[in-house]
Amino acid sequence: MQNRRAAREAALKALYAVDIGKNSTVDATQHIIKHTLKDDFDSIKFAEKLLLVTVDFAKDHDEVIEQHINNWDVNRLAIIDKLILRMALSELLNFDEIPTKVTINEAIELAKRFSTRKSGNFVNGILDAILKSLIKENKINKKGRGLIEASSR
């Protein structure tokens, strides 16, 4: 696998194409994920799963996000921030092998790179609050040492 950061970036771009461009997930996978990640089949598989899970659970994730953005509507969020939060929630809930700290740190880096100047801090704060709630509700199903940790940023 090339690296998961490149896969996450490709998945984010594909999510944007699906959400804003109204492209199908098949087209986004073919033209963005596969084109970007070339012959790195593990990265393609990871990015495609991340895309599909995020699209499938978008409404559910938006409800969780809405609970943690006090006095704000999820539809008023910067689109990239919303997509990053959805993607991170997909990882937290559906990718048992990825430590929570890694998911949050990668989301912060994506926000810094692709969104506004303040997005890294915003994403960090929201995901930290969401993670605490998910742990309290016993919804995080990570296996192995060090897989459940709050962000240290």
Image (cartoon, rainbow, N blue to C red):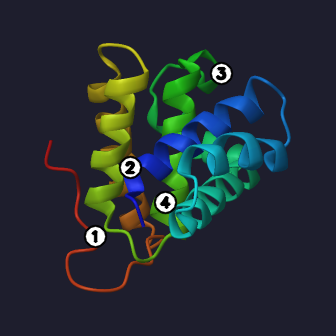
Please give the label number shown on residue 5: 2
* Mark found first going from the N terminus, 3 or 2: 2
Q: How far is mark 1 from mark 2, CA to CA?
A: 20 Å
* Mark found first going from the N terminus, 3 or 4: 3
Quarter of image, res 31? top right
Please give the label number shown on residue 75: 3
Residues tagged 3 and 4 counted as in contact (Cβ below 8 A): no
Spot occupied by residue 47 in the image (x, y as percentages of width and height): 57, 56
Is 74 situated left or right of 119 in this image?
right
Q: How far is mark 3 from mark 1, CA to CA?
A: 29 Å
* Mark found first going from the N terminus, 4 or 2: 2
Q: How far is mark 3 from mark 4, CA to CA?
A: 21 Å
Query: Which residue lies at the image location 30% right of the left edge and 28% below the top edge?
Result: 120
Q: Given the image, on which type of amino acid does mark 1 rest?
A: Ile
Q: Residue furthest left?
A: 152
The residue labelled by disc 4 is 91
Query: In the structure shown, which secondary structural element does the residue marked by tag 3 occupy?
Result: helix
Query: Which residue lies at the image location 42% right of the left edge and 20% below the top edge?
Result: 115
Q: Which is more foreground, mark 3 or mark 2?
A: 2
The front one of 80 and 36 is 36
Is 84 situated left or right of 97 in this image?
right
Q: Given the image, on which type of amino acid does mark 3 rest?
A: Asn
The residue labelled by disc 1 is 148
Quarter of the image containing the C terminus?
top left
Q: How far is mark 3 from mark 2, CA to CA?
A: 26 Å
Q: Given the image, on which type of amino acid does mark 4 rest?
A: Glu
* Mark found first going from the N terminus, 1 or 2: 2
Q: How far is mark 1 from mark 4, CA to CA?
A: 12 Å
